[in-house]
Amino acid sequence: MDIKDIVKEENLVYKKTPLMTNNVLSYCPGCGHGTAHRIVMEVLEELGAQAETIGVAPVGCSVLAYEFMNIDMIQAAHGRAPAVATGIKRCYPDKYVFTYQGDGDLAAIGTAETIHACNRGENFTIIFINNGIYGMTGGQMAPTTLKGMKTSTSPYGRDLGSMGNPLKITELVAQLPGTYFVTRQAVHTPAAVRKTKKAVRKAFDLQKENKGLCFIEIVSNCNSGWKMSPVKANQWMVENMFPFYPMGDVKVDGQLVIKG
């Protein structure tokens, strides 16, 4: 039997979405960016929104998004994606608009743009990849780096006395009146992928309803920056990142979710 007799439409359990380009992913093996990319593009494919979407990617590992997302993309200066997305959405209010940002971008140089876009309730979606480190530029400490976590600029671990506390930017923006849906998810297991995809779909649906800003944090790994194998990086993430950055919804329908 020839392989062509087996590879038929009705036999496929895995099919690449046409909203991902044919470019070879250049992320480090084990990185969660590729999975996050695919989730967003699958949702837009299901919405039939390829021609109705504009994405904004700034500097960092996320800057490569336009190489892989087969939609209209604009590159923003470092940290300025929410400001650029604000202008796009106000000019094209009927388009789906989203930013795709890392923690070094969104929670450091872009803190002002993030906070003010959330406070104003701009009607677009922010997708925030948190791996607790500057991945592209050499593994420096980020605002989200955990206490005691070693990086190239905190080789002995993050010291709270001299370096401050890790920033829970997601809980911070959830306090602002302009955010409508705020959640924290992951992409390290099939179950986590399904939950993240559900959250992304909800955010885009709410954007169409003009509900305000939706904010999705995706806790991921940086096995290259963490100096671990992909498997160990995922294990470390679950054991160390998740307790400090717990999974689940933080704000739903404009109301904070009370946990505990």
Image (cartoon, helix red, strand yellow):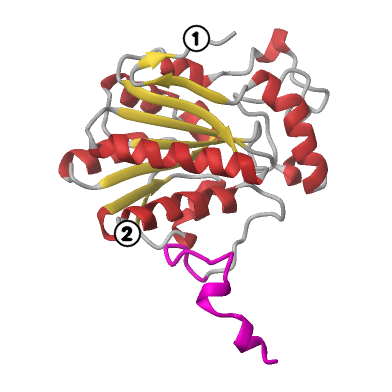
Q: Position of residue 7 (x, y in %)?
A: 60, 80
Which residue is drawn at the image coordinates 28% and 36% (left, top)?
207
Depth order, front residue of 130/155: 130
Q: Position of residue 25 (x, y in %)?
A: 59, 62
Residue farthest toward the bottom in the current orientation of the protein: 1
Which residue is drawn at the image coordinates 42% and 17% (left, top)?
174
Which residue is drawn at the image coordinates 38% and 37% (left, top)?
202
Please say if 258 is above or below 101: above
Is residue 78 shown to the viewer in this render?
no
Residue contact between numbered discs 2 and 1, judged by CB atoms under 8 Å: no
Is residue 1 shown to the viewer in this render?
yes
Disc 2 residue crowd, few under 14, some 14–19, many 20+, Cα 10 Å: some
Residue 258, numbered label: 1
Amino acid type at image mark 1: Ile
Magenta stretch, overall SS? loop
Amino acid type at image mark 2: Gln
Q: Secondary structure at mark 2?
A: helix
Q: Secondary structure at mark 1?
A: loop
Separation of disc 2 and disc 1 at Cα?
36 Å
* Residue 207 belongs to the span the image colors magenta: no
Please say if 257 is above or below 133: above
Q: Position of residue 74 (x, y in %)?
A: 35, 52
Query: Which numbered disc, 2 or 1, marks the residue closer to the eye?
Result: 1
Report the quarter where the C terminus lies. top right
User: Which picture quadrant has residue 112?
Assistant: top left
Which residue is drawn at the image coordinates 78% and 19% (left, top)?
148
Which portion, as a residue range, is magenta?
A: 1-22
Per the image, the residue denoted by label 2 is: 50
Disc 1 residue crowd, few under 14, some 14–19, many 20+, Cα 10 Å: few
